[in-house]
Image (cartoon, helix red, strand yellow):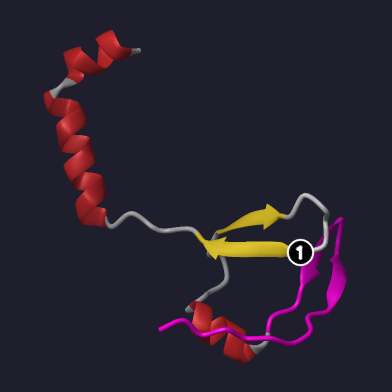
């Protein structure tokens, strides 16, 4: 099920940067917390911006990747 929200968002200055304000409902639907990273896509005409929450890698997956790299160190060196 896709939830589509519409509404306005205010553009504002934060120090030397700028931001777009999200509502509490937006935050809840995005399951976002401070520090989460989002991919930003700006349309070629500069009229729309899409944000996608970056997927995180679970600790189990990170461990599996580290083990694979350790088991195949020689191969990894040759691939550089």
4 left or right of 55?
Answer: right
Q: Quadrant of residue 9?
A: bottom right
Magenta span includes 8: yes
Q: Residue 50: image x %, image y %?
A: 65, 63
Quadrant of the snapshot with the C terminus: top left
Across and down, in percent, residue 54 comes to 48, 58
**Who's the residue at 53% across and 74% down the image?**
33
Foreground residue, 30 or 60? Answer: 30
Magenta region, residue range: 1-22
Identity of the residue furthest to the front in this view: 45
Determine the residue located farthest toward the bottom in the rendered image: 25
Whether residue 32 sits left or right of residue 69 in the image: it is right
Where does the N terminus fall, quadrant-wise?
bottom left
| Residue 30 versus residue 59 in the image, above or below | below
- In the rendered view, tell whether residue 65 sits above or below residue 33: above
Residue 69 in the image: above or below residue 80: below
Q: Residue at x 62, y 64 (%)?
A: 51
Examine the residues drawn in magenta and state their main secondary structure.
Answer: loop
User: Does residue 19 belong to the magenta stretch?
Assistant: yes
Measured as percent of width and height from the top left, residue 11 is found at: 85, 72
Q: Nearer the viewer, residue 24 or 16?
A: 24
Query: Which residue is under mark 1?
Result: 48
| Residue 37 rendering spot, x and y as whole percentages | 55, 59
User: Mark 1 falls on what kind of element?
Assistant: loop
Give the tally of numbered discs: 1
Classify residue 67 by image quadrant: top left
Check disc 1: other Cα within 10 Å, few if <14, some if 14-19, many if 20+: few
Q: Does 13 sit left or right of 29 as displayed?
A: right
């Amino acid at each position: 099920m896709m939830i589509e929200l519409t509404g306005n968002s205010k553009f504002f200055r934060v120090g030397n940067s700028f931001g777009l304000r999200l509502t509490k409902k937006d935050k809840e639907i995005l399951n976002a917390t401070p520090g989460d990273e989002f991919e930003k896509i700006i349309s070629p005409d500069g009229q729309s911006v899409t944000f996608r929450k970056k997927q995180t890698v679970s600790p189990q997956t990170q461990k599996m990747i580290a083990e694979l790299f350790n088991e195949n160190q020689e191969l990894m060196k040759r691939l550089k």
